[in-house]
Amino acid sequence: GAVVSQHPSRVICKSGTSVKIECRSLDFQATTMFWYRQFPKQSLMLMATSNEGSKATYEQGVEKDKFLINHASLTLSTLTVTSAHPEDSSFYICSARGRQLWKNTGELFFGEGSRLTVL
Amino acid sequence: QKEVEQDPGPLSVPEGAIVSLNCTYSNSAFQYFMWYRQYSRKGPELLMYTYSSGNKEDGRFTAQVDKSSKYISLFIRDSQPSDSATYLCAMSAVNQGGKLIFGQGTELSVKP
């Protein structure tokens, strides 16, 4: 099956620094990637949708200047948490779908997630 | 009211039991219904996918969708300790471009 690789799996940083998380589709071309955030014991909340080569679409309440998303190629999207603060500590998960995958099954493939801890 | 409601549990059952997990939803435009399993500290993995109403069976797992009641279920037969995880329902409408709305997730523990 399709594989989505997310890196790093765990990151600890100091308050005020920026952190970049990468999401790669390994065996398919991801036309669309989604970034979710999951707090402990809570569900996944969509942060933004990114289409290759265009600006990301952010969900209401998500600061686009704080969570920078770049989808420069069909296999890579990045999420940069700028000037991170302790309240940004969370589990960030990307998902991806390719044109063919969506047509056949409607499913998304998820990365393993990145746990961010801001001290 | 949330678009998707799911009892967070936790749900604890003995090994071999039949498990029933459920979600209700309010958006009648949802057409795609999915169940994901998430182990601790991992990303979700797709278990079952159903388009529109009906039943779908895959091994010990059965997914049911009742669009008239806006209610979906996942049944796990002969549950195993390895089934212990959080189960999330997720839904999407045709015009939402793949955006999934998730339930809160139900934490399941299967005791040997």
Image: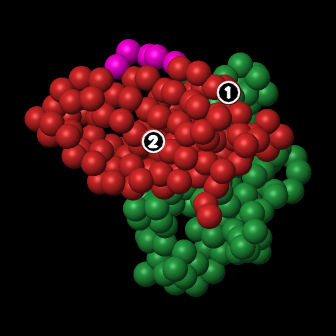
Chain colours: A green, B red
Residue A111: x, y in percent? 54, 43
Residue B103: x, y in percent? 53, 51
Residue A33 in view, yes or no = no
Task: Relative to A84, say whether A55 is above or below.
Answer: above
Q: Residue visible at 15% across and 36% down? A: B14
Which residue type does callout 1 highlight?
Ser
Residue B105: x, y in percent? 44, 51
| Left or right: B10 in relation to A65 | left
Query: Which is nearer the eye, A82 or A107?
Result: A107
Q: Report the magenta stretch's main SS.
A: strand
- Residue B57 belongs to magenta span: yes
For the C terminus of chain B, which image quadrant? top left
Task: Relative to A56, say whether A75 is above or below.
Answer: above
Query: Which is nearer the eye, B22 or A28?
Result: B22
Which span is picked out in magenta?
Answer: B56-60
Instruction: Kindly identify which residue carries mark 1.
Output: B52
Residue farthest front in this picture: B68
Q: CA distance from mark 1 to mark 2?
A: 16 Å
Both labels 1 and 2 in a single chain: yes
Within 10 Å of disc 2 (Cα), the crowding (few <14, some 14-19, many 20+) is many
Q: Residue visible at 46% across and 61% down? A: A42
The first of marks 1 and 2 along the sequence is 2
Instruction: Kindly identify which residue carries mark 2.
Output: B22
For the N terminus of chain B, which image quadrant? bottom right
Task: Relative to B104, say whether A67 is above or below.
Answer: below
Q: Residue visible at 47% across and 34% down? A: B73
